[in-house]
Image (cartoon, helix red, strand yellow):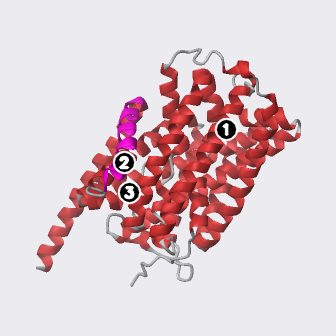
Amino acid sequence: MIDSQLKRSLTWVQGTAIAIGAVLGSGILILPAITAEQAGPASLISWLLMSLLAFPLAITLGSLGAKYPHAGGIVEYARLAFGDTVGRMTAWLFLGTIPVGVPIVALVGANYVVGTFSLPSIFIPITAALMLLLSLILHWRGVEMAAWAQVLILVLIVVLILGAIIAAGPHINEEQFHPLAPHGWLPVGTSAVEIFWCFVGWEMVGHLAEEFHDPSRDLRRIFLLAPMLVGVLYVALSVVTIGTHAYGGAYTVTPLSQLVGIGMGRIGSTVSGIVALLITFVAIHGNVAGFSRMVYSQARAGVFPAVLLRLHERHKTPIGALSALGLDFAVVLAIYTVFHVDLGAFMTWPSAMFLALYIIAMASALKLMKGAGWGKQALAWIPFVVCVILYPFSGWAMVYPILFGVIGWLMTRIYAKNVRRRNSVLG
């Protein structure tokens, strides 16, 4: 018999680090400069709005996780709200997120590090592979060890980024904030969709709910502190990027490196390279943690193959799901290495999928929280409406979630048919 019990060993401190790490991804390396180039100083409005949006989204996910602590996370909320079929379809949507998104994050970060240190391009997939492998090994050894590694690395990241912001502060020029919207207001909306990528990942902590000592207390603390800290870092970095005009032209390839160089001089390149490496790793680490638990939970529910249900005998970690992720990562890196695919084009697809998942999560919250008071209902309505509005801006990528949803529906029908056939034989 397969042991299907995860080990309760996480605290709110570790959970907060995992949440911040999952959200504070490779987007912070390039997006403040990219959005400033697209929308001018008005891009700061997009950063402020998306930072504020993170609060109702994160708090609602925290409330759901505290009330329904389950490794399935959004999948379980959808099942409870709308039934098994929608729950199973939602599980299939997740297969279009982390298996594609995390290798992209690793490659974007590796590309940045290689560019910063002027290394040969072959080091891009090698660096990405080493980061992915290290995360898988740490998670294999136990979630507690993996979580403390996340805490230590995150503290170092925050210190380095704050140091860069403070060092560049005296070089801010007020004139750089005028005119506010040199390219009009449409790019402000477009940049908001891109910035959404920087606020994806809150749900990953929900998948770890079964491993917290006190999910009800811990998750509420995590989803209050994490968006506050992430929002402050993003907005502060955006202000400094615009105020020092560290975007466009020579800043295109490694904008954070150029920004750090403004305040720190020659050492700035080394510092930004280290920051890029650490930020990329914590993003990988947090998402691997949550996704592997989701896969495990759905194998436990019979949605995915039973081989993914395997746990480590001593550490009680989902090594079946982690092994499958490792194989997937190897395939994605091989495709990138052989075909030299455009990472920018691929980033839109996981973003569209996460938008669809957040729409499902907030719709589930609205149904599950009926009678919980107007305050909690309002918190769920805000991100629901915003995500619905943002979804069409995904362009052709909006087809991606629909495709996976159809596949999930077909697999659900096949599963139900097999169950009926098995029951008729046994009966």
- Would you say the residues marked 3 and 2 are in contact, meaning their CB atoms lie under 8 Å apart? no
Q: Residue drawn at (32%, 64%), measured in percent from left and top?
A: 303
Q: Which residue is mark 2?
A: 380
Residue 305 visible: no
Q: Which residue is mark 1?
A: 236
Mark 3 and mark 1 in contact? Answer it, CB < 8 Å: no
The Cα atoms of the two marked residues, 1 and 2, are separated by 27 Å
In the rendered structure, which amino acid carries the disc numbered 2? Ala
Report the residue that reaches farthest toward the bottom: 1
Residue 42: x percent and y percent?
58, 24
Q: Is residue 50 left or right of residue 306?
A: right
Q: Magenta stretch: dominant SS?
A: helix
Q: CA distance from mark 3 to mark 2?
A: 14 Å
**Do we see residue 397 in this rendering?**
yes
Q: Which residue is mark 3?
A: 74
- Which numbered marker is on residue 102? none
Magenta residue span: 373-393
Q: Is residue 139 above or below residue 173?
A: below
Query: Is 199 placed left or right of 90 in the picture?
Result: right
Please state the horizontal and vertical placement of residue 300, each as a whole percent of the image.
36, 71
